Image (cartoon, rainbow, N blue to C red):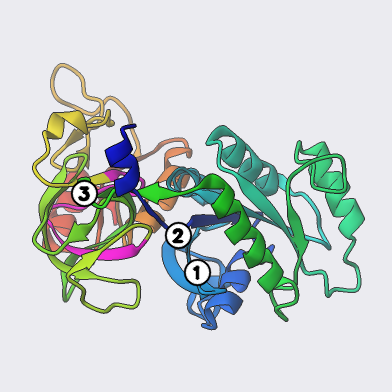
């Protein structure tokens, strides 16, 4: 890198992904940090969609990506880790390492995302920190004081005990990573959520990782293109521009980008970012047919609709694993006349 470009680089705040087994306290931790009550708004207390939130600790900003912990959301967790600079692996001290803990560890290691361990629920009577450390060691994570160099902090996401110290660890890890961005570069980042809003139209949540995203910019994510008509920060406040590592709400896409897609501002050759996809025709999944155009399988056919793309993807993955069930169409938003006609003509269930 040239001396000139080195001087142009500016330090940015860390983007942190929170991973762990379901119900081990990931959202409760973020809930305490943000002083809000997200858990109560989620179905069954389980996070249903990926969100991003910016907080300030010790005068420095930290952006958190809250990834769902349910097994059905494994793809979203993988994408979350890819988009993040650092990770927090949450492990409950009363349960230790569970299957999704191991999966989260694999995601962090495969994506080479530096991480710290938060041993949660230390306020419980049956909490066993030493056993949890031993479980982590068996899973390939050696924490400090237990034969390794992975930083850890005992916390109670419920009472807040140890949370400030955990955030201190995150800021220290961010300093070691020496995170920078180029303010003159074309803005780019990752899509973390997309949905159809009945009132506002297509709304896309994203994280900016480089450059500066501005209102009026052309924008592309794989095959989805548009212009940033409205740009909002994570609080829903309209802004003219956002720099890394800011969460952004973007209105202006002509079609919904996929969660995990990388986006770019400016004029872009779409062929650079087209990704391999399953057989689709106008958004409908193509059924196998014989030479006469008749379906070769006798199936239960479904038209699948959901409120946000994250939930749609999770439900779709579950259904696709079931025998003799075929999704003929799927989409975001309310059920429309087109969905009804599609289901009727295909003898499908919505």
Q: Is residue 305 above or below residue 187?
A: below
At a point 75% along the width and 69% down the height, the residue shown is 155
Mark closer to the chain start, 2 or 1: 2
The quarter of the picture where residue 293 lies is: top left
How many labels sit on residues? Answer: 3
Q: Residue furthest front?
A: 3
Mark closer to the chain start, 2 or 3: 2
How crowded is the residue under tag 1: few (<14 C-alpha within 10 Å), some, or many (20+)?
few
| Labelled pair 2, 1 in contact (Cβ < 8 Å) | yes
> Which is nearer the eye, 314 or 35?
35
Residue identified by numbered label 1: 60
Q: CA distance from mark 2 to mark 3?
A: 18 Å
Residue identified by numbered label 3: 184
Left/right placement of residue 195 relative to residue 165 reads left
User: Does the magenta portion include 332?
Assistant: no
At a point 16% along the width and 73% down the height, the residue shown is 200
Q: Quadrant of the N terminus?
A: top left
Mark toward the viewer: 2 or 3: 3
Left/right placement of residue 75 relative to residue 234 reads right
Image x and y of residue 59, in percent: 51, 74
Q: Quadrant of the C terminus?
A: bottom left
Image x and y of residue 201, in percent: 15, 67
Segment colored magenta: 246-262
Instruction: Report helix, strand or loop for mark 1.
Output: strand
Left/right placement of residue 280 relative to residue 42 reads left
Residue identified by numbered label 2: 13
């Amino acid at each position: 890198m040239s001396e000139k470009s080195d001087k142009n680089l500016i330090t940015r705040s860390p983007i942190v992904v929170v991973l762990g087994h379901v119900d081990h306290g990931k959202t409760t931790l973020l809930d305490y940090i943000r002083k809000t009550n997200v858990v109560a708004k989620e179905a069954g207390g389980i996070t249903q969609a990926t969100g991003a939130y910016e907080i300030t600790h010790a005068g420095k900003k930290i952006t958190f990506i809250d990834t769902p912990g349910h097994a059905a959301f494994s793809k979203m967790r993988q994408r979350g880790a890819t988009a993040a600079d650092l990770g927090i692996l949450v492990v409950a001290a009363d349960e230790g390492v569970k299957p999704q803990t191991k999966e989260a560890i694999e995601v962090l290691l495969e994506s080479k995302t530096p991480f710290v361990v938060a041993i949660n629920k230390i306020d419980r009577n049956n909490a066993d920190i030493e056993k949890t450390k031993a479980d982590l060691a068996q899973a390939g994570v050696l924490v400090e004081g237990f034969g390794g160099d992975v930083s850890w902090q005992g916390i109670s996401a419920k009472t807040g005990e140890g949370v400030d110290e955990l955030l201190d660890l995150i800021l220290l890890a961010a300093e070691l990573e020496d995170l920078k961005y180029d303010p003159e570069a074309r803005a780019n980042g990752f899509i973390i959520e997309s949905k159809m809003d009945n009132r506002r139209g297509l709304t896309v949540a994203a994280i900016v990782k480089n450059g500066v995203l501005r209102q009026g910019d052309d924008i592309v994510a794989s095959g989805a293109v548009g212009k940033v008509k409205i740009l909002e920060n994570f609080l829903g406040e309209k802004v003219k521009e956002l720099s890394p590592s800011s969460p952004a709400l973007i209105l202006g896409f002509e079609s919904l980008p996929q969660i995990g897609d990388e986006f770019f501002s400016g004029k872009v050759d779409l062929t650079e970012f087209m990704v391999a996809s399953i057989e689709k025709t106008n958004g409908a999944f193509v059924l196998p047919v014989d030479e006469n155009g008749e379906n070769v399988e006798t199936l239960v056919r479904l038209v699948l609709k959901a409120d946000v793309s994250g939930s749609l993807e999770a439900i779709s993955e579950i259904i696709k694993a079931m025998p003799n069930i075929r999704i003929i169409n799927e989409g975001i938003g309310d059920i429309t006349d087109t969905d009804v006609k599609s289901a009727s003509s295909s003898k499908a269930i919505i």
